Image (cartoon, grey):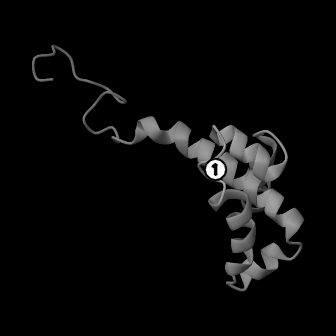
Amino acid sequence: FPSLPFPLLPPFSLLAPVHSGYFPSYTLGAMIATQLFAAAQQCIPNLKEEIRKGNLRVLHPFLREKVWERGSIPPSADALVKEATGEELSCKPFLQYLDEKYSRLYC
């Protein structure tokens, strides 16, 4: 970029994070994770309590049955989410998670 007659500003500068193009993917992954977690909570009533104790293994049977064994069989991530949770991908569980997390911090 040395031949440009003006300085580059973010997001085009060399100082801009190289992974900034992945931010939408991070959000999509977080949405899927919160929806899977909400479905797991319906199957495992004491899930949060077990995780607080450090017992993550209680989640393994759910993930094995709903995600790990099925991972490449459905034609898309959307289809996998629908199979695993019974619902199409929705922003509702993610927004609920954000509300619970940040309302405790800032309200």
Residue placed at 65% from the left, 60% from the top? 69
Q: Nearer the viewer, residue 24 or 5?
A: 24
Q: Residue furthest bottom?
A: 53
The quarter of the image holding the C terminus is bottom right
Q: Residue furthest top?
A: 5
Residue 19 spot, x, y in % from top left: 39, 42
Q: Residue furthest left?
A: 3
> Does dot 1 land on a helix, a strand or a loop?
helix
How packed is label 1: few (under 14 Cα within 10 Å), some, or many (20 or more)?
A: some
Q: Nearer the viewer, residue 80 or 31?
A: 80
Residue 4 spot, x, y in % from top left: 15, 16
Say above or below: 66 vs 10. below
Residue 47 spot, x, y in % from top left: 80, 74
The quarter of the image holding the N terminus is top left
Say above or below: 57 vs 38. below
Residue type of the residue flagged with mark 1: Ala
Q: Nearer the viewer, residue 36 or 5?
A: 36
Residue placed at 72% from the left, 78% from the top? 51
Query: Label 1, on which residue?
Result: 30
Q: Quadrant of residue 52?
A: bottom right
Q: Is residue 2 left or right of residue 56?
A: left
